[in-house]
Image (cartoon, rainbow, N blue to C red):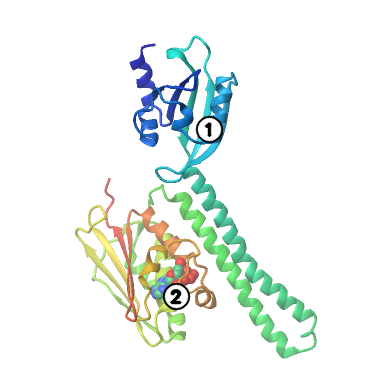
Amino acid sequence: MAKNSLLNILNGLSEAVFLIGENREIVLTNPQAVEIFGKGLEGQNIVRAIRHPDCLRATEDALAGVESTSAVIVLERPVPTTYQVRAAHLPEDDIFGARAVLSLADISHVREAEQMRSDFVANVSHELRSPLTALSGFIETLQGPAKDDAAAQERFLHLMDREAQRMNRLIGDLLSLSKVEVNERVRPTGMADVVSIVRRVITTLSSQAEDDQKKVVFHHPDLVAPIPGDEDEIIQVFQNLIENAIKYGAPDTEVSVSIDEMERVAGVRGPALSVVVQDRGPGIPAEHIPRLTERFYRVDDSRSRDIGGTGLGLAIVKHIVSRHRGRLMIHSERNVGSSFTVLLPATTST
Ligand SMILES: Nc1ncnc2c1ncn2[C@@H]1O[C@H](COP(=O)(O)OP(=O)(O)O)[C@@H](O)[C@H]1O
Ligand SMILES: [Mg+2]
């Protein structure tokens, strides 16, 4: 095979590839290898190009005749990156005196996803365990010290009910999250009347708002056409945002929800519907804002738990908005309040 044809094949691969001669000299590389290790590789000893013991051991094995070996290595340059390394033996009659082929595939994203999954499982277990531990404690108390104390029993049963509800909410939110994640790449097919959805959500939350001495005011144009969207999911978006505004706003203040129709807006194709949920209160310190939509991220852990938050609401909102090809924007000013803006495409564009 001509060198050019071989190069064309190597260029077409996503891995960094090295052909190595019997004296460990690099015979041929592809641009992907140059990108990681720099120019001037050909002719260099592989030991000097890739200074990693596992990688060199694999190369040695391949040169010695082992058909194929693999390893996972982390190289620090240019930034720490995880590679799946494979080294394979090449028979005598092969091209350009090469006796081994070494390839490095960047698997950092796979590793990251694995890490995220295992962090998530650890978080979920932790979140489920705390109400469960509380419940076990209450059961023990009811069986022992509070056995004949009717007043204490009443109090403990009330607390137990709260913990059970917390577990229930957490499981509900986990199921919603997994459902929206599965559907994230599938476009919603229905139509959603956002004004009527928001009105219903406000009604559902009104008693909670009253308990918190808050009033929710709603502004919207007279006629707003339904937009393409999944009604159940859009309900979840505004339930979460309006509930947050009620929970985290200061007492005796107003939460305002305003809908506007926009002809053009950055980041959304075609005309859009803008829904702003605004509260008056302590606001959110700027450094937390970029992380609010992470699962289980809370600014004030104990406050969120006290008021029954799962820490999953904004993660659910983010996924739903992205499934609808919309945008979520968060602004907050210390001691003034926060606003959460949802932009949703008003028409189906291609
Ligand atoms: N309107 C708001 N004002 C202040 N902080 C907020 C607001 N909305 C959300 N947060 C912060 O963002 C965190 C994540 O929100 P969310 O995902 O809905 O979880 P939670 O279940 O705690 O409400 C909350 O714990 C809270 O710290
Ligand atoms: Mg919430």
Question: Could you tell me if the residues under marks 1 and 2 are in contact, i.e. CB atoms within 8 Å?
Answer: no
SS class of the residue under badge 1? Answer: helix
Picture layout, residue 264 above or below residue 156? above
- Of residues 129 and 6, the one drawn nearer to the viewer in this rendering: 6
The reply to whether residue 320 is visible in this rendering is yes
Alpha carbon of mark 1 to alpha carbon of mark 2: how far?
A: 61 Å
The reply to whether residue 201 is visible in this rendering is no
Does mark 1's beta carbon lie closer than 8 Å to ligand 1?
no
Residue at image position (41%, 86%) is: 251
Dot 1 amino acid type: Cys
- Quarter residue 255 falls in: bottom left
Residue at image position (76%, 77%) is: 140
The quadrant of the image that shows the C terminus is top left
Quickly name the residue at label 2: 204
Quickly name the residue at label 1: 55
Q: Would you say 93 lies left or right of 286 here? A: right
Dot 2 amino acid type: Thr
Picture layout, residue 298 above or below residue 11? below
Q: Could you classify mark 1 by the number of other residues whose Cα lies within 10 Å: few (under 14), some (14-19), or many (20 or more)? A: many
- Quarter residue 150 falls in: bottom right
Task: Report the residue that reaches farthest toward the left.
Answer: 263
Q: Could you classify mark 2 by the number of other residues whose Cα lies within 10 Å: few (under 14), some (14-19), or many (20 or more)? A: few
Q: Position of residue 203 (x, y in %)?
A: 41, 76
N-terminal of the pair, mark 1 or mark 2, is 1
SS class of the residue under badge 2? Answer: helix
Q: Position of residue 75 (x, y in %)?
A: 47, 41
Residue at image position (23%, 70%) is: 221
- Of residues 4 and 153, the one drawn nearer to the viewer in this rendering: 4
